[in-house]
Image (cartoon, grey):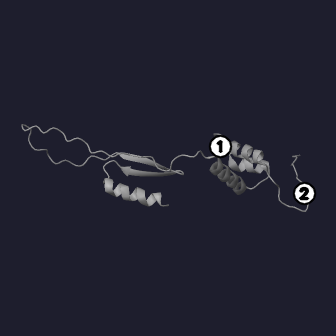
Amino acid sequence: MTKHQIEVITSVERRRRWSREEKERLVAATLEPGASVSEIAHSAGIHVSQLFRCRKELCQISAPSFPQLVAVEVVEALPAPATPAEPPPVCRARKKASMVMIELGGGRRLRVESDIDTDALGRIVDVLERR
């Protein structure tokens, strides 16, 4: 026979109040590797969505403050020295450009190719700053 914990609410107020420490304990348990949010919510006697809401609220509050954008200086590459004895370069297929990841803060990331037009990138960043 399995025993289940039952909570009897005797007051007029029907909602349970969770202390910040209790919420932090539950949220910390969900952040452990291999943790199952549904099992943790079930053991606490709450719905999974309530646990996700607590996690969202606590993570927003405790997120460290950092600048939304970091200053970046874009410089042009130095031209390669021209050697007059070499024949003109043969047109080859363009190599795949590498990707650059720009972290904007608030969990947002911008991924662009390394050969992006700097004016276009500036316009994109200006739009994202306004959001």
Can you identify the residue that label 2 sits on? 9
Q: Position of 128 compared to 113: left or right?
A: right
Against 107, residue 80 (above or below) is: above
Can you identify the residue that label 1 sits on? 31
What amino acid is at disc 1? Leu
Disc marking residue 85: none
Against 127, residue 71 (above or below) is: above
Is 26 or 66 nearer to us in this picture? 66
Residue drawn at (36%, 55%) of the image: 121
- What's the CA distance linking mark 1 and mark 2? 30 Å
Q: Are marks 1 and 2 in contact (CB under 8 Å)?
A: no
What amino acid is at disc 2? Ile
Mark 2 element type: loop
Residue drawn at (22%, 49%) of the image: 93
Expressed as whole percent of the image width and height from the top left, the position of residue 84 reads 7, 38
Sequence-wise, which precedes: disc 1 or disc 2? 2
Residue drawn at (46%, 57%) of the image: 129
Mark 1 element type: loop
Is 129 or 100 nearer to us in this picture? 129
Expressed as whole percent of the image width and height from the top left, the position of residue 67 reads 51, 48
